[in-house]
Amino acid sequence: MQKVSFFKSIHVKLVLIYILLIIIALQIIGLYFSKKLEENLKDNFQSSITQSMDLVQFSIREEILKERDDTTSLETSLNVILSEFATGEGAINEIRVIDKRNRVLATSDSSNRSIIGQKSPDDIVQKAMTSGYYEKIKIDEQTRNRVWLYAKPIVDTTGPNTEIIGAIYIEADIEQVFKQLKDINSIFAVGTAMSLFITIILGILIARTITRPISDMRRQAQAMAKGNFSRKVRVYGTDEIGQLAIAFNHMTNRLQEAQSTTEAERRKLASVLSNMTDGVIATDRKGRIILINEPALSQLHVTRETTLNRPIASVLGIEQDYSFEDLIHLKEAVNLNFSTADTPYILRANFSVIQKETGFVNGLITVLHDITEQEKIDMERREFVANVSHELRTPLTTMRSYLEALADGAWQDENIAPQFLNVTQTETERMIRLVNDLLQLSKMDSQEYVLNTDYVEFNKFFGRIIDRFEMSKSQNVSFIRLLPETSYFVDIDTDKLTQVIDNIISNALKYSPDGGNIRFGFTVHANMLKVMISDDGMGIPKENVGRIFDRFYRVDRARARSMGGTGLGLAIAREMIEAHGGKIWAESEEGMGTTVFFTLPYELDEAEDWE
Ligand code: ADP
């Protein structure tokens, strides 16, 4: 935020306004005061002088009107009156009496007696006689003081007609009045300066009380903009600014709450987005990616840096087929096939538009779902149905042709008929085996499968199965037992495990050459028994070894079928071993025999207890 310069700050403005107002007020008061004071002082001065003059005027008029024989005595007596009067009044410089012909009759100034008998130099007297009185302020040339000149006619009211018989002229030193005025004004000026100084300081303090909370709020607003809500404005009082500060703090709290709610929501959304298994991509209204979650990044094998702000269609690799406009209007999902020759990988993308009520498109949300497994299951299901149909059709076709031959008359042939019937019987049995195997697998698939386990001594259990095969075998194959002496106990479903071992041994017998060996053995490890059944038979090509446990998989279809196999034996064995918590696998090389291994969970401690 911009910094407020010193002279533009409210603080300075307030102080300046305050000072200006005080100065204007003081100026007006001062002006009015000094004007009135001047008038008052002058009035007092002048009225005190005119009052004294009235007194002297009376004496003078009496003296002039007095009957006398010579003028000299009038002059002398007037001079005496004036001198007495002038000495009494400090402010009066000189009083003159002037007759009606404007000649000086007497003066209080004894040093200025020379002017007696002469014409009065001032026309003031003349003007006073005509207009009642006259006054003037002039500067004394010698002292440079202001002198008040005042003249008043002397009127004879004793006769029938009032008659002007002369005038009194006075010169008074008014300078002291001005001096007094000046003194008072300077006292006033000092007082003004002092009060101004005090009010400036007060003004600064008062302005501070107003501006401090405001600048505090300003600082808080700046801190809030940076995300710091811990600051609080100090509340100095309950006035409007105090209320504002309280409201501001309240607002800060609400904002903080709102922000933490938004933050919590954002975090919740972020955690939902990153913890969901589906990928989510959001774009702006131009189709550029603005949000992409972790699952989407790993599903598409891209990084956030390389995808943000890029067009969605190009990130999904569908820019050839779809524009952003197309994706907005797309109703159905799009399958993105990233499969390679060995690994299938298919993502399903669902698009939904973020739209305002007005219809304005704000963006697009894409949800990516990995459907590889689903597709694989679908494919396996289709393959399974095809396999089952094929496996059933082959014996049925064989049986049909044999039955047709029998129906066509072969039944009468004593040599062929039993042979043909024998084939149909074998095929029927194979079909029953196949259907039974399928039923067993489907049971295992539908989780209806329960293991009835027993604690058995594995050496004995395994040995009995080997014995059974050894006694019933028709081939010239030697059984080599590599079983340990010690007894080991395992918790197994004996029926199921018998079926597994039966299947492995019958396979070994099936593919063993005449004079071959079949080795049986097992080893004990910390947490499992590892069982091994090995033959010297034809073996399995390396690349197919892993697949012999798949349903219907047979290395050599025709040969295996001719041996009566259904292709489901090892698939069932795998399901059973896995249900026991073990693993099954085979190691083989073409022409070098095959070894099938499987493991069973086993706890060494328990076995020792049994021992
Ligand atoms: P089948 O009923 O055909 O024997 P299995 O699931 O038991 O079905 O076996 C699957 C395929 O694995 C067989 O068809 C055969 O090709 C191969 N196979 C299994 N065991 C052996 C073995 N010991 N030697 C050679 N090939 C074997």
Image (tube, grey):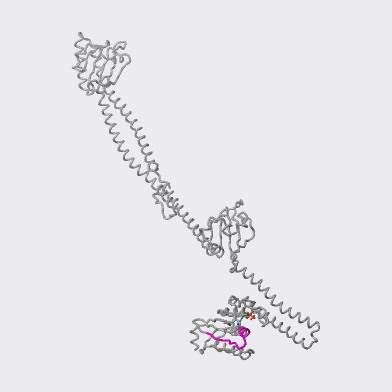
Give the answer, above or below, for where 310 lies relative to 377: above
325 or 383, nearer to the observer: 383
The location of residue 550, given as percent across then percent down, is 62, 76
Quick check: which quadrant has ligand 1? Answer: bottom right
210 with respect to 336 (left or right): left
Residue 600 versus residue 176 in the image, above or below = below
Q: Is residue 385 left or right of residue 602?
A: right
Task: Residue 467 in the image: state x and y as whole percent.
Answer: 59, 90
Q: Which residues are magenta?
A: 507-522
Residue found at the far top of this picture: 69
Please determine whether, in this image, residue 7 is positioned above or below residue 96: below
Q: Residue at x 66, y 72 (%)?
A: 383
| Camera-nearest residue between 564 and 352 | 564
Give the residue displayed 25% in from the left and 26% down from the top: 176
The residue positioned 53% from the left and 86% from the top of the image is: 489
Whether 519 is among the magenta residues is yes
Corner quadrant of residue 520: bottom right
Horizontal and vertical percent for residue 519? 56, 86
307 within the magenta span: no
Instruction: Spot the residue most to the front.
Output: 591
Residue 35 location in percent, x, y?
Answer: 33, 28
Q: How many labels sit on residues?
A: 0
Who is closer to the viewer here, 382 or 228? Answer: 382
